[in-house]
Image (tube, rainbow, N blue to C red):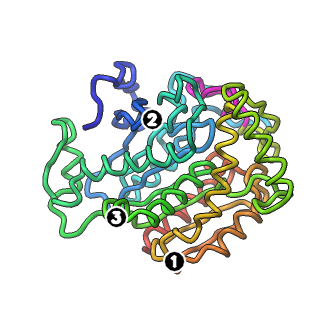
Amino acid sequence: MMVENEVSPEAKVQTQDYVDGAPQIDSFYNKEGLLIRTYSWIVKNAIGILILIHGLNSHMRLQYLRQNAEIVSNDKAILKDENNYYVYKDSWIENLNNSGYSVYGLDLQGHGESEGWENLKTNIKEFDDLVYDVIQYLNKIQDILCLESGEYCRIREEENMMMESYVNREKKIPIYIMGISMGGNIVLRLLELLGKSKDLNNNLHINGCITLSSMISIDKLVSTNSFKYKHIYLPLTKFLSTHFPKRRLIKRFKFSKHPYVNDLILFDKIRFHKWITCRFGYEIIKAIDNLKIDMEYIPRDIPILFIHSKDDCVCYYTGVENFYKEMINYRKEFITLYDMDHMITMEPGNEYVIGKIIEWLLKL
């Protein structure tokens, strides 16, 4: 059952004008005993459910709601209201709701309002722990919605209204997963674990996957089979992870194609403003390698949509394109973006991207 007593009073209070769309805010404990914060924007008579996964050093609401700031130029944004910073109107979540989809999401462990391993932000024990948190959340959603039985089960009284959208259906409501950047790696890794485990395959019902600006390749000069990767990247990050696991790496890049995005990120007071730990850095390098190694386990019949910018400065486009070409899947599609960078939910043209996503979903 989802946690009630661990949700702070502040988390339950909504702004008077419901700037953030008044999501239901909840939480659960993962297998490590960490509290994971969750959010949901429910519509009646939903035609599908979207589970959204954010990227590294971000969080759910920052990634998929709009920001309460004025973009005065491509170089600069001005903060309007830091206490009501997440705006539902014209956001990706509102677009999905208006198209008939209920939206769920979580702050990954160590991010946003979720607890981190060893009580540290942006710190993890193993990368797959992030994936298993999402799997646990998916199972909880399926339990709450009672997709198997079509009856009420394990729900609280205040969730009854939400249940009216899902019960007594002739068929199961489809569930789709979508992730950006590191979240894009997570949703693909989830499909790999699904393909490797008969138990997971029997319990989870994923009807489609969308991966945005996916963390599949992070250096245009390095492949996972290269000398530089095997003999420099892996050994160096492993050494730092072993000897200085809690020390913070230094973030050396800023977004230059649309610099105002840097302002939107810095304005957010919930986001942790230091960079990841050395251990997290090593786990990311391993995660990219593991995604490539286990590619064969990705189910061949689940529709998968890749969306990636040609000019992505963080996750290398050609590496993602090569992964897509090598992946055996009968229902895959790749959309290339131009004049965009990595943070495609915040950049000019993001309206086009969410429009293409909804168009793709409606065709399934």
Q: Distance between the residues labelled 3 and 1?
A: 16 Å
Residue named by callout 1: 331
Q: What kind of element bears circle 3?
A: loop
Mark drawn on residue 248: none
Place of residue 292 in the rendered image (x, y in percent of width and height, measured from the top left): 65, 63
Which amino acid does the dot numbered 1 rest on? Arg
**SS state under label 2:** loop
Residue at image location 30% in from the left, 46% down from the top = 140
- The stretch drawn in magenta includes residue 273: yes
Q: Quadrant of the C terminus?
A: bottom left
Which numbered disc, 2 or 3, marks the residue that appears first in the sequence? 2
Is 230 rendered above or below residue 33? below
- Dot 3: within a 10 Å radius of its alpha carbon, few (fewer than 14), some, or many (20 or more) residues? some
Image position of 67 with respect to 349: above or below: above
Circle 2 residue: 20
Q: Is residue 276 left or right of residue 12?
A: right
The three-letter amino acid code for the residue at tag 2 is Asp
The earlier-in-sequence mark between 2 and 1 is 2
Q: Quadrant of the N terminus?
A: top left
> Along the polypeptide, which appears first: circle 3 or circle 1?
3
In-image side of 202 versus 130 (left or right): left
Residue at (63% x, 51% y) in the render: 287
**Residue 323 part of the magenta-drawn span:** no
- Does 286 appear above or below 210? above
- The stretch of residues the image draws in magenta is 262-275
